[in-house]
Image: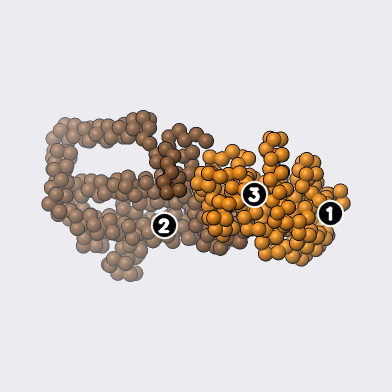
Chain colours: A orange, B brown
């Protein structure tokens, strides 16, 4: 589960996030919307444990995973290595998860040989292979066409149902938020605060 | 998914890329060989026109001397010694420079303090460093190799620091999120991104280092190509100077073609898709 009690997050003198409390239970998907620059990515980086420089407390489990806005793959490592090296997963587990996301036979390909949709599937496989307790989704389907988004939404929903992590999804897309979220909030103001959507 | 200039092969489950020599690449290599041959021909022509084999020997004098030195094995001990010095100094310079570059690139505060030091070190003439090392450490092998490495370390540090400054922050976030150990981050995230800077530093370094090694040997060693050139200088043997220099140029070309070029191709194999 995710539990955040944030008092403030600032960059220098600029306060970006104001006081907010956030609880997400296993299997729950919290959808976060808000205008560009509201602080969604900052909030997600805090929840993912990437940014520890904030005033407050975070309890977000040991096994965290994230699907980034860009696929964020190591272009000099093959698809399978992109799953095993960051997560420490075995090759067998990586192959099984790559198969789950529809990339059977592509394990040894370079990321540059993949389409954007396939690269995003690698990101999803990397996120789920470690059976995460916490999953952060930051605009995970950006720049894809409608058909690919439908496929990936269905795939992601299935995997969330199976592994039941506590999920926070940030997106501008009403379609994505509606399809995956079990609860929704909106980030607004300066410094930003959470408002029930 | 174009594999225009590469051949995709699957062997034992692992996919490898085997570069094919395209017509364009073959033409480029032929052009390089023709250009070198033209240079030798021009040199021969100038030597014939000057007609002074003592002061302006042509390839007709130098190449037989070089061939003789190689086939009789006379040049080999000096070539080996110089190559060993070049190799050691190169490894020290690349190792220390890379570590320094990564540290300074990752620590802007430390970089602000040490950047002026790098500027100073980069502008100390090689001859000054060599003489000081011989005076401080003594006329020995340690001083020779240390002096050469010291000349190259600041440049490698600067090149690698610039590379670290443009590392992909998203990959760094990914590594932090998945709590990749420091060694794994270095091997899988940082060094692959620094491959272009490392190759540039290696190529610039090896050519600079062997020239400095010759000076070091000229000034304070009793073997090596630089020492032989010193003897040839004292005997006013210009043919000998050129034959010794050409021998080592050939060795360094072999290092470039047999070691550095394949390494660069391996590091960039993922780009050829």
Question: Which residue sits at x=47%, y=35%?
Answer: B3
Q: Residues within 10 Å of mark 3 (few under 14, many from 20)?
A: many
Q: Residues within 10 Å of mark 1 (few under 14, many from 20)?
A: some
Instruction: Left or right? Give the position of B228 relative to A86.
Output: left
Which disc, if any, is residue B94? 2
Q: Which residue is mark 1?
A: A193
Which disc, if any, is residue B220? none
CA–CA distance in space, label 2 to label 1: 50 Å
Q: Residues within 10 Å of mark 2 (few under 14, many from 20)?
A: many
Q: Position of residue B34 (x, y in %)?
A: 27, 32
Task: Say which of marks 3 and 1 sits in front.
Answer: 3
Q: State the SS at label 1.
A: strand
Q: State the SS at label 3.
A: helix
Instruction: Left or right? Give the position of A49 relative to A122.
Output: right
Discs 2, 1 touching: Cβ within 8 Å: no
Question: Which residue sits at x=63%, y=40%?
Answer: A117
Question: Which residue sits at x=31%, y=52%?
Answer: B211
Q: Which residue is mark 3?
A: A124
CA–CA distance in space, label 3 to label 2: 38 Å
Q: Position of residue B93 (x, y in %)?
A: 40, 58
């Amino acid at each position: 589960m995710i539990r955040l009690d944030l008092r403030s997050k600032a960059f220098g003198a600029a306060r970006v996030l104001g006081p907010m409390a956030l609880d997400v239970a296993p299997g729950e998907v919290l959808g976060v919307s808000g205008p560009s620059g509201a602080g969604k990515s900052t909030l997600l980086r805090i929840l993912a444990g990437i940014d520890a420089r904030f005033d407050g407390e975070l309890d977000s489990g040991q096994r965290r995973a994230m699907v980034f806005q860009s696929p964020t793959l190591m272009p000099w490592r093959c698809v399978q290595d992109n799953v095993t090296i960051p997560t420490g997963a075995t090759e067998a587990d990586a192959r099984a998860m790559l198969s789950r996301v529809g990339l059977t036979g592509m394990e040894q390909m370079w990321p540059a040989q993949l389409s954007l949709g396939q690269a995003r599937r690698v990101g999803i496989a990397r996120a789920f292979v470690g059976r995460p307790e916490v999953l952060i989704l930051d605009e995970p389907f950006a720049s894809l066409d409608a058909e690919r988004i439908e496929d990936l939404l269905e795939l992601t929903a299935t995997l969330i149902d199976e592994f039941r992590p506590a999920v926070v999804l940030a997106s501008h897309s009403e379609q994505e938020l509606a399809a995956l979220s079990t609860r929704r909030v909106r980030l607004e103001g300066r410094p930003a605060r959470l408002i029930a959507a | 998914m174009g594999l225009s200039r590469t051949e995709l092969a699957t062997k034992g489950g692992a996919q490898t890329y085997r570069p094919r020599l395209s017509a364009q690449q073959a033409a480029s290599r032929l052009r390089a060989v023709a250009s070198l041959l033209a240079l030798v021909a021009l040199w021969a022509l100038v030597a014939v026109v000057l007609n002074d084999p003592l002061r302006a020997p042509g390839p007709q004098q130098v190449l037989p001397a070089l061939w003789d030195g190689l086939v009789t094995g006379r040049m080999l001990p000096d070539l080996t010694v110089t190559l060993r010095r070049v190799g050691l100094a190169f490894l020290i310079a690349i190792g220390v420079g890379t570590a320094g570059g990564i540290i300074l690139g990752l620590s802007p505060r430390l970089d602000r303090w040490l950047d002026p030091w790098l500027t100073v070190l980069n502008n100390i003439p090689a001859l000054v460093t060599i003489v000081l090392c011989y005076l401080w450490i003594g006329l020995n092998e340690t001083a020779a190799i240390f002096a050469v490495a010291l000349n190259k370390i600041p440049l490698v540090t600067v090149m690698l620091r610039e590379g670290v400054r443009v590392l992909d922050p998203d990959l760094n976030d990914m590594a932090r999120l998945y709590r990749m150990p420091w060694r794994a981050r270095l091997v899988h995230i940082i060094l692959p991104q620094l491959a272009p800077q490392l190759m540039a530093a290696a190529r610039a370094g090896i050519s600079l280092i062997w020239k400095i090694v010759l000076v070091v040997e000229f000034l304070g060693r009793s073997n090596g190509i630089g020492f032989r050139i010193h003897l040839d200088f004292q005997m006013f043997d210009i043919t000998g100077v050129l034959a010794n220099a050409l021998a080592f140029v050939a060795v360094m070309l072999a290092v470039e073609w047999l070691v550095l070029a394949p390494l660069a191709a391996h590091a960039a194999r993922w780009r050829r898709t």
